[in-house]
Image: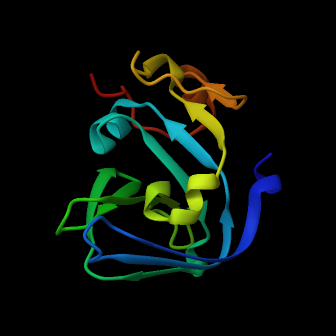
Amino acid sequence: MIDAFRRTGRMTGKCLCGAVTLSIDGDYVAAVGACHCSKCQRSAGVMWAAFTAEAEAVTVTGEVTRYASTPFAERAFCPVCGSNLWLRNTDDPSAEYEFMPALFPEAAEFPLISEIYTDRRPAYVPLSGNHRTKTRAEWEAENRHVEGDMP
């Protein structure tokens, strides 16, 4: 399903204050996935939504602060305005970036194609549309995760 949304091209995004610029010149997925795990909720304030871009296509300009949110992943943000920038696997230098869509004006047109940890979704965040969904148990049965989603 993701292959239908793969694109090659250029996009530029920036944080709220403009201190960090993110440029994509290459392959990315023009579709968004949402996560409702407790780490994502706490990090983003409601849920995490992201689209992916190939590492070799990404250029980051400006100072970025990285936080190791798990033993195998980092979350990055602007140290000036605090904007969330990305989530990324740190075990693999070629791992894709999972970018916050609102940083890129073009991403406002991207459809929602997946939603995970749906059994952890707050009542005030119903997402509509026809997209794939997985509960915590379904997602964790197939993917590496941090044991014991935060209380």
Which of the image's four quarters has the N terminus? Answer: top right
Q: Camera-side residue: 95 or 144?
A: 95
Classify 101 as above or below 146.
below
Q: Residue at x 63, y 53 (%)?
A: 109
| Residue ID at (37%, 39%) | 40
Look at 29% across and 56% down and name the residue there.
Answer: 68
User: Can you give x and y, in whole percent of width and height, for residue 96 in the image?
Assistant: 57, 64
Q: How is the image coloured?
A: rainbow
Place of residue 92 in the rendered image (x, y in percent of width and height, measured from the top left): 52, 67
Using the rendered view, name the quadrant where residue 130 is placed. Answer: top right
Q: Residue at x 67, y 58 (%)?
A: 30
Is any atom of residue 96 visible in this view?
no
- Side of 17 where 36 appears, left or right: right
Residue 134 figure quarter = top right
Given residues 57 and 126, the one toward you in this image is 126
Q: Is residue 127 above or below residue 145?
A: above
Tell whether 130 sits left or right of 143.
right
Q: Is residue 135 something one can see in this rendering?
A: yes
Please identify the quadrant where the C terminus is shown: top left
Q: Where is residue 55, by image quadrant?
A: bottom right
Q: Residue furthest left?
A: 80
